[in-house]
């Protein structure tokens, strides 16, 4: 499962943001794109088979705390032994998302491939 940042715990210290291998973490009120820090560019097929524009600028997911874009979060699988954002957070604010459709290991590995391999870019 992806992680989210618990707004009750986050003190906006920002230690997590530079640690994310997929630029899934953004500052308070920051606009974001799927192409930020990934191999995605232009028209891409997402994991559900839908075509999206990875360069579209999306609205911030929080105006109160740092936030994680779940579709860019892989739980650091295949790259680190533990979620890097949680490892550096002094207040344990990055927390596993619960209540959403569970992402198993194979889905997280597929997401990592999607974020890091250019094969999903349709504009090549
Ligand atoms: S668990 Fe890893 S991939 Fe997910 S937001 Fe944290 S650092 Fe980024």
Image (tube, helix red, strand yellow):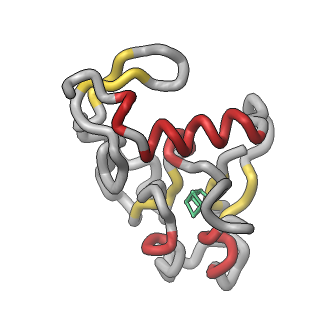
Residue drawn at point x = 64 percent, y = 79 percent: 89
Q: Quadrant where the C terminus lies?
A: top left
If the picture is divided into quarters, which one holds ligand 1? bottom right
- Vertical order, 38 against 108 (above or below): below
- Vertical order, 60 against 48 (above or below): below
- x and y percentages locating residue 28 in the rendered image: 40, 63
Depth check, front residue: 100 or 43: 43
Q: Is residue 6 left or right of residue 64?
A: right
- x and y percentages locating residue 47 in the rendered image: 53, 24
Q: Can you tell which quarter of the image residue 108 is in?
A: top right
Asked whether the viewer can see residue 65, the reply is: no
Residue drawn at point x = 30 percent, y = 34 percent: 54
Depth check, front residue: 70 or 39: 39
Asked whether the viewer can see residue 18, the reply is: yes
- Vertical order, 109 against 84 (above or below): above
Q: Is residue 86 left or right of residue 123?
A: right
Depth check, front residue: 99 or 72: 72
- Vertical order, 88 against 50 (above or below): below
Residue drawn at point x = 65 percent, y = 55 percent: 78
Q: Quadrant where the N terminus lies?
A: top right
- x and y percentages locating residue 115 in the rendered image: 45, 43
Depth check, front residue: 42 or 62: 42
- x and y percentages locating residue 41 in the rendered image: 25, 37
Q: Is residue 71 left or right of residue 57?
A: right
Q: Is residue 99 left or right of residue 70?
A: right
Residue drawn at point x = 52 percent, y = 54 percent: 68
Q: Can you tell which quarter of the image residue 52 is in?
A: top left
């Amino acid at each position: 499962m992806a992680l989210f940042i618990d707004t009750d715990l986050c003190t906006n210290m920002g230690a997590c943001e530079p640690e994310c291998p997929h630029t899934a973490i953004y500052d308070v009120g920051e606009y974001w794109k799927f192409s930020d820090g990934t191999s995605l560019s232009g028209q891409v097929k997402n994991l559900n088979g839908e075509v999206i524009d990875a360069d579209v600028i999306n609205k911030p997911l929080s105006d109160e705390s740092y936030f994680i874009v779940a579709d860019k979060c892989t739980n650091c699988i295949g790259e680190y032994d533990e979620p890097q954002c949680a490892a550096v957070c002094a207040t344990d604010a990055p927390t596993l998302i619960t209540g959403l459709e569970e992402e198993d290991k194979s889905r997280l590995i597929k997401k990592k491939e999607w974020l890091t391999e250019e094969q999903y870019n349709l504009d090549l």
